Amino acid sequence: MEQAIIIAASAIGAGLAIGLAAIGAGIGDGAVTGKAIEGMARQPEAKGTILVNMLISVGLIESIPIIAAVIAIVLVFANPFIK
């Protein structure tokens, strides 16, 4: 019975981890892209620099859901809490 509860809690935790990381990354990507477009509209001559900085920032933001997915996979398939 204890093992079933641990497995169920791990599955719920994995789903929450991936879901919240995806929501956070979506909000972050939207904010970064919106501000980059606003900056390009204000200073068109700095478009190249702003674009490069935006792409680097979006790449770093997108690493968070990937890390969350790895943690979720470990929780589901190689659960350290199960004996």
Image (cartoon, rainbow, N blue to C red):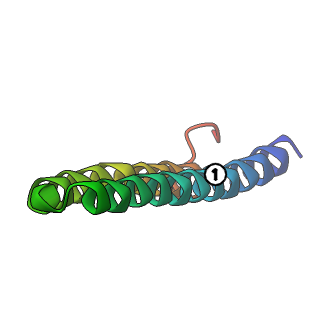
Instruction: Tell me the amino acid under the disc marked 1.
Output: Leu
Residue closer to the observer: 19 or 9: 19
In the image, what residue occupies the spot 82% across and 51% down?
4
Residue closer to the observer: 50 or 75: 50
In the image, what residue occupies the spot 29% across and 55% down?
42
Secondary structure type for disc 1: helix
- Residue 45 appears at what percent x and percent y? 10, 59
In the image, what residue occupies the spot 56% across and 50% down?
24
Q: Which quadrant of the structure image shows residue 29? A: bottom left
Where the C terminus falls, by quadrant? top right
Residue at the extreme right of the image, as rendered: 1
Q: Is residue 30 left or right of residue 47?
A: right
Q: In this view, does 62 lie to the left or right of 14?
A: left
Question: Is 51 located above or below residue 75 in the figure?
Answer: below
Total marks in image: 1
Residue closer to the observer: 49 or 21: 49
Q: In this view, does 73 lie to the left or right of 20?
A: left
Residue closer to the observer: 21 or 50: 50
Q: In this view, does 9 lie to the left or right of 50?
A: right
Q: Which quadrant of the structure image shows residue 19? A: bottom right
- Residue 65 appears at what percent x and percent y? 46, 55
Say which residue label 1 marks. Answer: 20
Q: Residues within 10 Å of mark 1 (few under 14, many from 20)?
A: few
- Residue 32 appears at what percent x and percent y? 39, 53
Question: Is 51 located above or below residue 81 in the figure?
Answer: below
In the image, what residue occupies the spot 28% across and 50% down?
57
